[in-house]
Amino acid sequence: MNNVKRIDPRRPFVIAPSGLKRITLGAEHIAGAIDEAAQAALHGSHTQKAKPRRVYEAGARALLVAAHSDRGALDEHARQTIAAAAIVADAATEVILVVFGELTDDAAALGADKVVEFPALARPAFAPDQALAALRDCVSAFEPAHVLLPDNATGDGDLGRRYAARVNASIATHVVEIDAEHVGCYAHAGVSFATRAWPDVILLAPEAVAAKLPFVGAGERVAVPSEACAPSNTTRYVDRGTTQLDAAQVALEEADFIISAGNGVTDIAAFEALAKTLGAAIGASRVAVDNGHFTRDKQVGATGKTVNASVYIAFGISGAVQHLQGIKDCRHVIAVNLDGSAPIAKRANLTVIGDAQSTITALAGQVEQAKQASHLTVAQASANVREGVAA
């Protein structure tokens, strides 16, 4: 007789932040199998312990991190830069975060001790002169030992280089290694590695530091330095605004709003009509692509496109590991599925339990009603203006 205990293929599992399925050994053995975050995901967030607050001596020394926000949120690269400053900060160092735009994220959870916001300098406004002046005013006010920015192509990397050139500061770019003593980056087209002591300005490459911290900062909101509040009309640049493209012309990797279809979507024409109504790019699961409903360039997942949309709506997608890997960087995920226990529901910020096709039809109707109400409101406002002028 075979006494080997059979492994239950349906044993408990969690979906890690990477989108991968992590098998657990059952409730009685979880402590040694997964970390606290996974336990919280399995048993409920109420079991997650509060992180301790980092204690520091205020006013002794400061590290300043600057980054642009997008509709109140910081991207992962900016979060990593804040985490880098918080990790290397000792008990005599505070971390000051300067945000160009509004910040609705939890600044303390990001590791920041003080936060300064410049709502008027948010993306997509192009105001490098004003941003540079605001950064210089913050440096003058807080006198940080070093300034850190994410080395990206969306304004922060450019701002860091402008600041270093303007004040004649030492700078290290594309930094891939950082600790309390030195920074490191690749040199000579990547064939060698160079290190040096901390310069005045550090531009951190993506994925150099994990954004997850074992502690929290003070998260204190402080007033903008008075000099930085002064409006400036002198600039050599003209902001021509942004061009609104048809969502169908935007590559999935660059799309900010995506609706994606899976096997649960049966009326493809209605789904495409909803995408046009919402102004969203179209994605699809591998099953939907294999069935011939969508072209291969619409496939989202590890074997397709990896996307980082602000909003990703998955209609009738169960959430295979490969698909979850493709949407791990999306800010808000909404799942529409008949199965409330599907893997996509564990990743989603909001899950609608229902038929995907019926939800598509209902959502299209609601959007049309909202548009008609908006047109009526605008028309009424115009009529009121005309009546006022006539009077």
Image: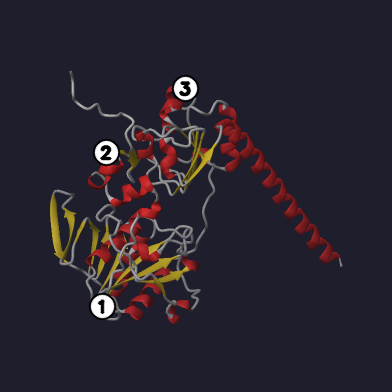
Q: Residue at x 18, y 24 (%)?
A: 3
Q: Amino acid at mark 2?
A: Leu
Closer to viewer: mark 3 or mark 1: 1
Neighbor class of circle 3 (other Cα within 10 Å; few <14, some 14-19, many 20+) is few
Front residue of this view, candidates 325 and 388: 325
On the image, which quarter does residue 301 sit in?
top left
In this view, which residue lies farthest toward the right? 391
Question: Do labels 3 and 2 touch, CB within 8 Å?
Answer: no
Q: Which residue is mark 3?
A: 292
Front residue of this view, candidates 209 and 128: 209
Pinpoint residue 348: horizontal percent, then vertical percent. 45, 43
Counting residues from the N terminus, which is met first, the one under dot 3 or under dot 2? 2
Q: Taking 6 as reference, is 67 left or right?
A: right
Counting residues from the N terminus, which is met first, the one under dot 1 or under dot 2? 2
Q: Which residue is mark 1?
A: 61
Q: Which residue is mark 2?
A: 25
On the image, which quarter does residue 110 sit in?
bottom left
Above or below: residue 349 compared with residue 59: above
Q: CA distance from mark 3 to mark 2?
A: 39 Å
